[in-house]
Each structure stands twice: as C-alpha cells, then as structure tokens.
Image (cartoon, rainbow, N blue to C red):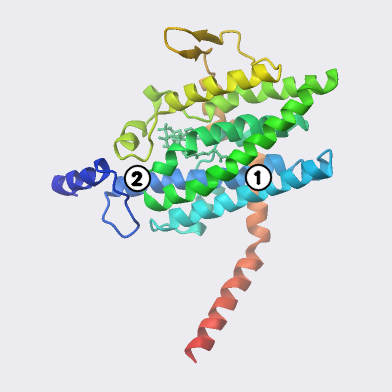
C-alpha cells in the first residue's frame, strides 16, 4: 500500500465520507473492522446466555414477555453484525470457529453469573446503558454497513436499558429484602460495567488508529467517564449506592472522579479466566453442534432450488 493511497483514503475519512464494501481500503482498516465487528457480534450472541438463564423464572408474565423480547433482540443484533462483518470478506462460519477456538474475543461483561432476578435489572440498566454509550457514536462510524446497523441496534438497546432500570426501581422501592437484592446486584455489576469500555487510553492498543479512521469517535476513557456521569444521578434517584467510596463530584473537571479499576481482573476475564468463560464457550459449542443439521438442510435446500432454476 503506497503512501498516496493511504493519504487519499485518509482524506475521504476526514471529509466524513462513508466507506462502502466495494471501496478500496487499507488492509489495516479492513482488519480492524473485522476484529471489532466480529467481537461485537459475538458479544451480542454470548450476551443472550446470562439473561436467557432467567426467562423461565421471570416473576410475572409482563417481565417474562419483556425479557424474552430483549434476548431475541440481542440475537437479531448479532445477526446484523455478522452480516456487516461479512461485507468485509470474512464468513460467519470463520468468525464462529474463531470464537469457539478461543481466538476471537467477546465482551468481558458476559463472563459474570446472573445469580438473582435483580441481576436482570442491573444488566439492563448498567450493561445496556454502557453498551448504548459506546454504540451511539458508532452510528457515525466511517464504515457504512456498521454505522447503519447501529441505528436500529441503539433504538432497541434504549428499550433494554429502560426495562432494566424499571426493574431496579421497582425492587429499590419494594420490601427491605427486595431493596437488598437490588443493591447486591449493583455492587456486583458496577465495576465489570466500567471495564466494558476497555483498557485505559494509555493501554488501548488500537485506540489512536481507530480514532484517526473514525471507526471510534470517542476514546475508551471518555466514554467511561460519560457513563459514570450519567449513571450517578440515576442511582441516587432510586436510592441505591454505587460501590465506590472514592466516587465524588469534581467541580473543576465538571465530572465525577471515581476509584481505580482492577485491571488484573479485567485481563484475567478477557483471557478466559473469568467466573463463567468456560460455561459460555461450552454453551456456544453445544448450540453450534446441535445446529449442524439445520445448516446442512438449509444448504441442501438452496442447492435444490438452484438446480431447479437452472433446469
Ligand atoms: N472485553 C473483552 N475484550 C476487550 C474489552 C472488553 N470489555 N475491551 C477491550 N478489549 C480488548 C480489545 O478487543 C483488544 O483486543 P484485541 O487486540 O485482541 O482485539 C484489547 O482488549 C485492547 O483494547 P483496545 O485497543 O482499546 O481495543 P478497541 O480499540 O477495539 O476498543 C472497544 C475496545 C471499546 C470494546 C471497541 O472494540 C468497541 O467499541 N467495540 C464495539 C462495541 C462492542 O463490542 N460492545 C460489546 C459489548 S455491548 C453488548 O454487546 C450489549
């Protein structure tokens, strides 16, 4: 790739032009997008597991219907994202194989267990809240198919966030035992939610280049700060306490200061050593194996139709 090509590409990016699948693009740009969109797709699919765990135990028909719809939405998001990645020349089979082989990452957050019903509230409120914070700017990502997929995804995530917050609000206003469940879930999900935004900017390997290519519009730390700033008043409103003694409004910065993140825990979870990593991959492997006959039947059907058309 010569410098003139790279410079011409950067000028298109700087002019806010969208890059489309058949446009020439630097190999690094393509690779970065395949990595990020693939990881994002896997996160949506693996993300169905912790909540799927509670569908049959939701406390009312209304809660069950909402949770079922939300988990289905996540499956849909995974499919749009695999399709967006496929426009870059990788196949869904390849991406799935990399996930199952432990080579492709998915979000660290989905390696924590959902122990009580309140965890479903905490996930909707915090995990989907963090996801939206990260994904709204992706609607302006320089790669067209990814940006367009994000628009619908964000609308649905916003419903997910509200259903979670409403569960937390109901529990927080309930009996002392219910309030305790909500607080316990918040205590366990708060720090992992902050880790979702990725390492500090100084340790973010891809951050600078992705900002230049306008794949990312904000850095990991900027989005994490926005998330903290918007979540603190939400916690106050429902009378729950964020588990961080160092959390404090900083008048000078115009932001909340917060305590240190346990990066050892983050990397342990990212590298496969979290509480649920093994179970999550086993569940995906089982689904892949048990779906083999569906893939074979769909292919055979497509072949038959093609042969009939050509006859
Ligand atoms: N969980 C697992 N891995 C992570 C996480 C995380 N929370 N954060 C960063 N990483 C990985 C990166 O993938 C990268 O690893 P790699 O080089 O092997 O691919 C490494 O840590 C270093 O991080 P960065 O250089 O900062 O990576 P990047 O620039 O890609 O930023 C981020 C990470 C912010 C997650 C980005 O990829 C992104 O915005 N992705 C799209 C959103 C997304 O995937 N959301 C998933 C959760 S939301 C949901 O599914 C509901």
**Can you name the residue that lies furthest to the front here?**
237
Nearer the observer, 190 or 236: 236
The reply to whether the C-beta atoms of the residues labelled 1 and 2 are less than 8 Å apart is no
Most distant residue in the bottom direction: 311
* Left-right relation of 65 to 12: right
- Residue 142's mark? 2
The relative height of residue 300 versus residue 247 in the rendered view (above or below) is below
Residue drawn at x 72%, y 48% is: 68
Horizontal and vertical percent position of residue 120: 72, 34
In percent of the image, x 53 and y 42: which residue is there?
A: 154
Percent x, y of residue 61: 83, 45
User: Taking 254 as reference, is 168 above or below it?
Assistant: below
Q: Is residue 135 visible?
A: yes
Q: Residues within 10 Å of mark 1 (few under 14, many from 20)?
A: some
Q: Which residue is mark 1?
A: 48
Residue 302, relative to residue 109: is it above or below? below
Q: Is mark 2 within 8 Å of ligand 1?
A: no
Give coordinates of residue 302: x percent, y percent. Answer: 55, 77
Q: CA distance from mark 1 to mark 2?
A: 28 Å
Q: Residues within 10 Å of mark 2 (few under 14, many from 20)?
A: many
Choose mark 1 or mark 2, whichever is in front.
2
Quarter of image, res 56 = top right
Query: In the displayed structure, would residue 111 be above or below residue 281?
Result: above
How many numbered discs? 2
Q: Secondary structure at mark 2?
A: loop
The residue positioned 43% from the left and 41% from the top of the image is 138
Describe residue 177's horizontal placement relative to residue 296 as left or right.
right
Q: Secondary structure at mark 1?
A: helix
Numbered mark located on residue 92 in the image: none
| 1 or 2: tag closer to the N-terminus | 1
- Between 152 and 202, the one lying in front of the other is 152
Q: Residue at 54% of width from left, 36% of height from top?
A: 131
């Amino acid at each position: 790739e010569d410098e003139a090509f790279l410079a011409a590409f950067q000028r298109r990016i700087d002019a806010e032009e969208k890059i489309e699948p058949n446009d020439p693009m630097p190999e690094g740009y393509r690779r970065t997008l395949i990595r990020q969109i693939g990881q994002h797709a896997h996160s949506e699919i693996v993300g169905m597991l912790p909540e799927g765990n509670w569908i049959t135990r939701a406390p009312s028909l209304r809660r069950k219907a909402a949770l079922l719809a939300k988990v289905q939405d996540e499956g849909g998001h995974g499919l749009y994202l695999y399709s967006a990645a496929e426009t870059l020349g990788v196949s869904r089979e390849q991406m799935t194989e990399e996930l199952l082989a432990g080579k492709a990452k998915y979000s660290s957050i989905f390696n924590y267990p959902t122990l009580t019903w309140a965890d479903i509230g905490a996930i909707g409120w915090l995990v989907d809240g963090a996801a939206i914070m990260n994904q709204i700017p992706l609607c302006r990502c320089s790669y067209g198919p990814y940006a367009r997929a994000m628009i619908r995804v964000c609308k649905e995530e916003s419903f997910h966030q509200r259903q979670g917050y409403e569960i937390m609000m109901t529990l927080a206003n309930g009996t002392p035992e219910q309030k305790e469940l909500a607080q316990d879930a918040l205590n366990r999900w708060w720090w992992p939610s902050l880790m979702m935004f990725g390492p500090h900017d100084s340790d973010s390997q891809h951050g600078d280049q992705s900002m230049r290519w306008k794949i990312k519009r904000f850095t990991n730390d900027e989005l994490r700060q926005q998330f903290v700033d918007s979540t603190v008043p939400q916690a106050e409103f429902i009378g729950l306490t964020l588990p961080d003694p160092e959390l404090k409004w900083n008048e000078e910065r115009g932001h909340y200061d917060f305590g240190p993140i346990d990066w050892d825990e983050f990397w342990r979870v990212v590298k496969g050593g979290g509480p649920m990593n093994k179970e999550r991959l086993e569940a995906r492997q089982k689904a892949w194996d048990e779906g083999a006959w569906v893939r074979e039947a769909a292919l055979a059907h497509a072949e038959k139709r093609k042969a009939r058309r050509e006859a």
